[in-house]
């Protein structure tokens, strides 16, 4: 089953310089492990919400605005599509992601008809 | 309805009805669990289990109660599921799976030679999966394992039937759509997940236990269901002493259930309870189960709580209570699962063993740490110890403080009574 894994980080989270320096290499290691297991299908880090653009069409009119679609304390910093045996494996994969230690990972199954 | 024959027939029917009702209580979870294992379809499993019990009501009066009611019911339910799946062409894949599984399943934990696997443990772990909300875990456990209806569960948790129905549907959908596995977790997940199952069963029990004398009987029935499920879990996990510990703990609490409040619904303190009305059979059963658990020499928090329960339940008079041992058990409990509530209970036990002044010291230390703000039992305990020391004015002030924080009517009545008692002329 495929799951979308959102990598979310709270707005005010500030890491120590050492921890901050750790995140990049630790994420690379996670990607390497999950690619090796054949679990990770695709994924990427995202630019911050200040670079986001929201697009809507209402009554035929195109509405474009600056910023994210929802003002929340948690922001999506990246995503991975993972293909797992079941939710227990998806939880295990998410729990190993370095951001799990200070952020939040949301695991959502793909809609399957 | 004039002849004796009709009356006799009705009595026989009632007997069979009783046998079916008993089979329902004993076998429902097993039948549903087996059917989910075969078909992977929770709704189909429940419907077919229901059909099987309806069939039993029809044929058992004619043919007698089968030797293995559980195996009979599971077979009927399985055949019913195969019929239904055959009719739905779109379900062809499921049918193939069901047909193969039902014929070749080697039987995971075949505990009665009936050839029907006991899948209840898988069902328990799935119902209590941490990816479900706690409310959903409780509701799902009661529905699929204990066989309570949605209406009964809704009444027990004081929510509208619609709300409960939605909660159950949502939980089942999540199990299916997010693919929560139907299995006993692998070894590395087992301790944590087992703790989760035990917590749900204990919560169930406490929901029933906290129901007061006048309250809904359905809520009190939760204690019986919780004990039944804990007993099943203990049988299914014979190497898990905490499962036995939880079962023993429930027995010791349940044995005292009827004496906790008087006929007016007022709280009766442990030392004032009529011990002759405690259920001796449950106390003996609890003692036996706890001994079995402790022989494994892997004490956990449920076993320690049960050991404390045993100290109370086996004391013939309040004065015979081994408070020194209780204080020591609370000390061990505090090391395994540190919590201010346990520390408060330890203070009470120390007060009983070494005198109120020693207990008061521990309460003061707890208060100084800022723990348990707004928790009425903290000032209530302080009040009780001050009263025992003869410091009545301070006791009255503490009882008043507790009264301002208490939640239930029974507690407020008790505390108001104590305020009056300690404020009056000594």
Image: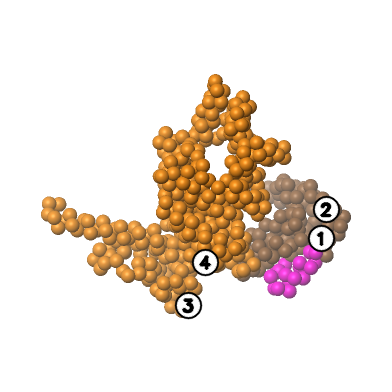
Chain colours: A brown, B orange
Instruction: Give, as a single range, the part of the protein colored magenta.
Output: A26-42
The earlier-in-sequence mark between 2 and 1 is 2
**Residue B365 vertical placement versus B311 (above, below):** above
Res. B158 in view: no
**Residue B174 vertical placement versus B372 (above, below):** below
Residue drawn at (44%, 75%) of the image: B102
Q: Which residue is mark 3?
A: B106
Q: Which residue is mark 1?
A: A23
Give x and y (percent) for residue A39: 69, 70
**Residue B37 vertical placement versus B215 (above, below):** below
Q: Which residue is mark 2?
A: A15
Give x and y (percent) for residue A15: 83, 53
Give x and y (percent) for residue B209: 48, 46
**Foreground tag (3 vs 4):** 4
Q: Please, which chain is the residue tagged with disc 2 on?
A: A
Q: Residues within 10 Å of mark 1 (few under 14, many from 20)?
A: some
Give x and y (percent) for residue B223: 46, 50
Kindly check if marks 2 and 1 are in contact, taking CB atoms under 8 A apart as contact: yes
Kindly state the secondary structure of the residue where label 3 is placed: loop
**Foreground tag (2 vs 3):** 3
Task: Find residue B168 and name its label.
Answer: none
Residue drawn at (52%, 58%) of the image: B290
Kindly check if marks 1 and 4 are in contact, taking CB atoms under 8 A apart as contact: no
Q: Residue furthest right?
A: A17
Q: Residues within 10 Å of mark 4 (few under 14, many from 20)?
A: few
Count numbered badges in the picture: 4
């Amino acid at each position: 089953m495929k799951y979308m894994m959102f990598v979310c980080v709270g707005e005010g989270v500030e890491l120590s310089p050492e921890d901050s320096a750790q995140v990049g290499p630790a994420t690379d290691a996670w990607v390497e492990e999950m690619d090796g297991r054949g679990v990770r299908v695709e994924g990427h880090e995202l630019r911050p919400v200040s670079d986001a653009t929201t697009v809507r069409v209402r009554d035929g009119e195109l509405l474009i605005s600056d910023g994210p679609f929802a003002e929340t304390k948690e922001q999506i910093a990246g995503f991975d599509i993972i293909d797992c045996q079941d939710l227990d494996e998806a939880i295990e994969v998410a729990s190993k992601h370095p951001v799990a230690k200070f952020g939040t990972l949301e695991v959502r199954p793909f809609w399957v008809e | 309805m004039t002849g004796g024959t009709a009356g006799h027939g009705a009595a026989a029917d009632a007997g069979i009805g009783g046998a079916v009702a008993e089979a329902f209580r004993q076998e429902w979870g097993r039948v549903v669990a087996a059917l989910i294992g075969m078909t992977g379809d929770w709704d189909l499993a429940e419907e077919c289990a229901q059909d099987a019990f309806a069939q039993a009501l029809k044929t058992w009066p004619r043919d007698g109660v089968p030797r293995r009611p559980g195996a009979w019911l599971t077979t009927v339910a399985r055949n019913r599921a195969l019929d239904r799946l055959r009719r739905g062409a779109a379900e062809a894949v499921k049918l193939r799976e069901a047909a193969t599984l039902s014929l070749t399943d080697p039987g995971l934990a075949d505990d009665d030679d009936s050839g029907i696997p006991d899948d209840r443990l898988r069902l328990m772990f799935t119902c209590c999966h941490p990816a479900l909300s706690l409310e959903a875990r409780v509701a799902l456990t009661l529905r699929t394992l204990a066989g309570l209806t949605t209406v009964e569960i809704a009444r027990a948790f004081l929510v509208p039937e619609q709300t409960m129905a939605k909660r159950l549907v949502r939980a089942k959908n999540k199990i299916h759509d997010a693919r929560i596995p139907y299995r006993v977790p692998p070894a590395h997940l087992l301790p944590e997940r087992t703790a989760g199952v035990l917590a749900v069963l204990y919560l169930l029990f406490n929901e029933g236990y906290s129901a007061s004398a006048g309250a809904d009987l359905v809520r009190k029935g939760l204690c019986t269901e919780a004990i039944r499920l804990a007993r099943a879990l203990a049988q299914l996990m014979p190497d898990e002493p905490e499962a036995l510990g939880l079962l023993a703990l429930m027995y010791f609490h349940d044995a005292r259930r009827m004496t906790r409040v008087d006929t007016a619904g007022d709280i009766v303190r442990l030392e004032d309870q009529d011990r002759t009305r405690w259920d001796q059979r449950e106390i003996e059963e609890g003692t036996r189960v706890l001994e079995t658990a402790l022989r494994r020499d892997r004490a956990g928090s449920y076993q320690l709580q049960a050991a404390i329960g045993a100290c109370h339940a086996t004391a013939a008079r309040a004065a015979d209570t081994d408070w020194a041992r209780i204080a020591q058990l609370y000390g061990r409990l505090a090391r395994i699962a540190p919590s201010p509530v346990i520390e408060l209970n330890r203070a009470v036990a120390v007060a009983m063993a070494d005198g109120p002044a020693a207990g008061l010291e521990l309460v003061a230390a707890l208060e100084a740490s800022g723990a348990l703000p707004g928790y009425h039992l903290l000032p209530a305990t302080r009040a009780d110890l001050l009263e025992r020391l003869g410091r009545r004015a301070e006791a009255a002030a503490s009882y008043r403080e507790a009264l301002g924080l208490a939640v239930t009517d029974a507690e407020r009545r008790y505390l108001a009574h104590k305020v009056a008692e300690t404020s009056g002329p000594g």
